Image: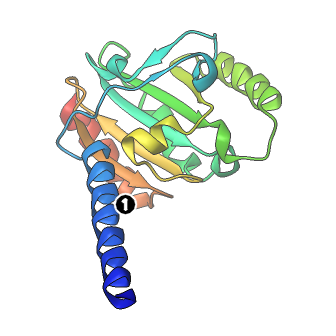
Amino acid sequence: MIERLKKGVDEMKKILMVTVALVVSLSAVEVGKVPSTVVLNGKNGGTVEGKPWSSQSLHGKVHILLYVDPDERKKNDPLTKALKAQQFDQSKFASVAVINLAATWLPNVVLESLLKKKQKEFPRTVYVKDKKKVLVKRWALADDESDVLLFDRDGKLLYKKYGRLSDAEIAALIALIKQTL
């Protein structure tokens, strides 16, 4: 009887794990697809100016989205410098930096002050706060990392990489942006 009960519990665990994996894979952002709409506002975050941000804003232009743990903010500096040097046409290309505020021990008040300075320094980039790891959960992004995502004009994901991009990957990404523009 106990063996049968243990076997039943093990089967239930397997079913639960498969269900969880299926739910995560259904919501994960996939290359070649438009991800589910996510809105950051209020307690979940929003723009530096305090306005709501929606992933629907990733339509109409080619967009690069950097989803960054503040502790990993310098990891892809070579990429941001390469993008800045390109000076892509703002009518066709835009950048969004979503800061994962829940991924660090730094106080939000300090980070929000730094983000306001960054927004002034880089006015071509939209800075967004994710206070509750919404994109980590909804799009299955890497947590505590520097994530890079490229979207076409229709909001379809063309490229994703979690972690530091090599020089070759940066060159390939720049080439992909030029090709997509």
**Relative depth, front residue between 10 and 135:** 10
**Relative depth, front residue between 7 and 142:** 7
Provide the residue designation for mark 1: 168
Percent of width and height locating residue 36: 29, 31
Under mark 1, the amino acid is Ala
Percent of width and height locating residue 20: 34, 56
Mark 1 burial class by Cα count in 10 Å: few <14, some 14-19, many 20+: few
Percent of width and height locating residue 63: 35, 28
On screen, residue 169 versus residue 152, left or right, reads right
Percent of width and height locating residue 4: 31, 85
Label 1 residue SS: helix
On screen, residue 160 versus residue 95, left or right, reads left
Q: Say if 147 sits above or below 4 in the image.
A: above
Residue 55 lies in what quarter of the image?
top left
Q: What's the colour scheme?
A: rainbow
Q: Which residue shows up at 34% across the image and 88% down it?
A: 1
Residue 62 lies in what quarter of the image?
top left
Q: Say if 19 sits above or below 4 in the image.
A: above
On screen, residue 159 versus residue 163, left or right, reads left
Q: Say if 164 sits above or below 82 in the image.
A: below
- Whether residue 81 appears in this view of the structure is no
Q: Which residue shows up at 34% across the image and 65% down it?
A: 17
